Image (tube, coloured by chain):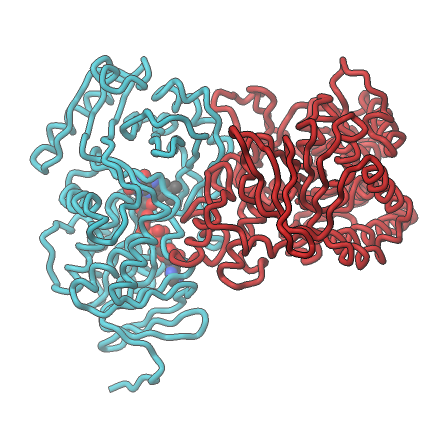
Chain colours: A cyan, B red
Amino acid sequence: MTTYPTNRMQADVIIVGGGFMGAATAFFLRRQGLSVILLERNLVGQAASGVNFGNVRRQSRYLGQLPLANRSRDIWINLPRLIGEDAEFVMSGHILVTTSEKDGARLEKYAVDCKPYGLDLTIMTGDQARAKFPMVGPDIRTVSYSPLDGHANPRLAAPAFGRAARRAGARVIENTEVCAITKTSEDFIVETRDGHSFQAPLLQISSGAWGRAMAASFGEDIPFAANGPQMGVTEPLPYRIGPVIGSASSVLEEGVYLRQVKRGNIVYGGGRRSVADLVAKRSPIDPLNTMRQMPYLARLVPQIARLRVIRTWSGVEGYVGDNLPIMGPSSKVPGLFYAFGFCGHGFQLGPGVGMTMAELIATGHTDIPLEPFHIKRFQ
Amino acid sequence: MADEPVIVIGAGPAGTRAAQRLVQAGLRPVVIDENDRQGGQIYRRQPENFHRTPEKLYGTEAAKATALHTDFDLLRPHIDYHPGTTVWGVSDEGLMTVCGQDVTIVPFSRVIIASGATDRIMPVPGWTTPGAYSLGAAQIALKAQACAIGQKPVFMGTGPLLYLVAWQYLQAGARPAAVLDTSALSTRMKGLRRMASRARVVANGVRYMADLARAGVRLHAGITPRAIEASNNQVSGVTWCDSRGRLRQVSCDAVGIGYGLRSETQLADLLKCDFTFDPCFTQWRPHVDRNGRTSRPDVYLAGDGVLLRGADAAEAAGQLAACAVLRDGGHGVEDTEFTQLHETLAIMNRFGRGLAEAFPWPAHLARALPDETVVCRCENITAGEIRRAAGELDAPEMNRAKALTRPGMGRCQGRMCGLAAAEILAAARNVPVREVGRLRTAAPVKPLPLNCTVKS
Ligand SMILES: Cc1cc2nc3c(=O)[nH]c(=O)nc-3n(C[C@H](O)[C@H](O)[C@H](O)COP(=O)(O)OP(=O)(O)OC[C@H]3O[C@@H](n4cnc5c(N)ncnc54)[C@H](O)[C@@H]3O)c2cc1C
């Protein structure tokens, strides 16, 4: 048997990375009764989880992901009961809009296909949509309406889960960068840049765009890219736009989306992404892209052209080759779990991922189908 | 982008002298300025159809103002001048500018940023009431539009600008109700030692104070602001504690507030220049060598946009930055020119630091600010909200506090409230203000219309 230095902190589970996935997993693991150490390089929820668009949207997701997304939505509407605050979640509804017949047909097909998964969408013509949502622009021909989706404030959600996890007894350790993870016969030994080490029989890697390198160190590399979606926000105006509005166009540049927050500002994003710098931990925001987004935003909601942008930003997000996350057990190392690479759609999933991973780690089983997300698909 | 032009951002004293020096060396710089007319803040020109004399507009500085305007007018055929144009971002291809609805991408070989400064504000209960202005705004109204912010305004804060603006109002026929300065007389005496390096400037200041006193304007030193009072949602008075702790009140119809200046550093931030904390001015600023070179080889800074030393220093620093640009670009510049400018600036440095000592930023006021006072006026965020970020939400630095309770999240990106918010955060966490950092800049530096298009 190996002997370990006595000052090494131990727990049932170590979570590497305190984004939404890590923070929510820590919270739900405590409810499963396991002891948890969460190690975060900066502050909880400061990376992708804190700067994303804030879409809490299920429609247009990969169908096999809907059970997870449904579970997540059920948690979103219960946040105040669960963690004591709502992270500004509003069930505003979500509409996907198109200007082309081809994209419209795709929306219609999806609305049929997602029904068995419990997602009810209403397909509308442009005129029907404009009768219900007067701000929608005249070029829009087909609209898919998901009344039970909405949006929330990304700056608040993951930190709130981090605080709730801490209150529930998780040891949330910030400003601590993991630099090495090794597996002995029973335990994982995690070393940090400031010279501390931690030990646990179970470990989850939820380090977002930085997860790929960690998985690769266990011999499980995957096709991967780190990119930065491009965001912006306008000055405030009276709260009028109800639903989140997104373009369903298959043309990259046209794929913009927007939502109005209750304070009045319109948050938007989409189109081309920038290439992230994993060392500097930043994704550039390209002002040319800000310019490219403008006419397409005005196509969704023409009145937006009369406003001014007050801030733009980006964030580092991990995209897996097939646009689906890495989630579930390692195929090589017992006790190792992954939840990273959420391909620009992980915010909605955050609470559901936390609950599902906690279940899986604590009990070895979950009813939520995760096979499509197993890392073994790339082996 | 070696073949691209040198860009000068800002056409105040620093930018004008920088451009002039580049032209002397045979270059044709691009000069981009947000204002419609050249001159910058201090030597701001009145609209074309206004006809006040330079003496009336600029007082003791009339000759300098006229010289700067005339020299610039002579430069016009030799530069590409873009007035009314804002640099709002930085792309791989160059600076992003906007004029009206036209966005232009301006490539550059080197850029000199001379973007000036704005008022440093310490909030006080009632400071967002209509009728309360920043000191700079009060001065702009007078200079550019010949308008007064009120018939009997109070000027409150600290720094020499307080007296200059009050004096200018007096000259224009609006008698200030009082000048309220947080700096005590004894504090000012300490700074005087260094300020003695420029006796003429000190003498001017003393003259403004004497003229004000002679006209019956009460000048109070060592005060502690309490509140700006309102009636019918309009400023009606100011309450403060005098140096002996007695509560005082003065009626007025407007207030101009300013506690010295803060450098406009957003463009240097977007260009990824390194910043350092300057304990003398208690603010973060881009790191520069004594010639204005930043940590980035193609970016230079001059004027109040990097070091708060006033207009005369800005002219010298502008010329110096241009000399550095020329030398780095392989043009000959005599060593003596550098030496002379360094000597001039050494005096100004000493003086600037003396001023900062004489009229210190009253950081301690942040700690006493009531919870319900609005600090970030764009987002309506109170001191209490910033303290909640510091405590319950455990934000260790400004960007985290901004993410959690929104100070600095609005239109001005914290240019107005950022320094005071940092003091509140630091006080609540009991750490020196440098430890709570500074708000990161995001493009667009100023609000950008969503209906603009790229002009090629
Ligand atoms: C600009 C943008 C817009 C987006 N819009 C949406 C949207 O509208 N809807 C939606 O559903 N999704 C959206 N997403 C995606 C969503 O934000 C992410 O999928 C989700 O937040 C990922 O969470 P995470 O916890 O996996 O990653 P992250 O939030 O990136 O967290 C990973 C954490 O790991 C930490 N870490 C990394 N390496 C180490 C180490 N060595 N040691 C310790 N800690 C480490 C990091 O510091 C970080 O905090 C968007 C993403 C971005 C960037």
Left or right: where A145 falls relative to B170: left
Where residue A83 appears, as percent x and y from the top left, is 24, 54
Quarter of the image with the C terminus of chain B is top right
**Is B414 positioned to the left or the right of B141 in the image?**
left
As displayed, is residue B240 above or below residue A241?
below
Q: Residue at x 40, y 47 (%)?
A: A316
Q: Nearer the viewer, residue B206 or B228?
A: B228
Instruction: Evaluate whether residue A319 shows in this view.
Output: no
In this view, B415 is above or below B80: below
Q: Nearer the viewer, residue B6 or B133?
A: B133
Name the side, left or right, on which B125 lies relative to A236. Answer: right
Task: Please give the name of the residue rendered at 41% of the width and 26% of the height, measured from the top-left corner.
Answer: A237
Q: Residue at x 72, y 43 (%)?
A: B301
Residue at 39% in and 39% down: A229
Extreme-left residue of the structure: A116
The x, y position of residue A13, in whole percent, is 24, 68
Res B203 quadrant in image: top right
Q: Is residue B228 visible?
A: yes
Residue B134 image point, x, y percent: 64, 36
Q: Quadrant of residue A205?
A: bottom left
Query: Observer-nearest residue: A253 or A293?
Result: A293
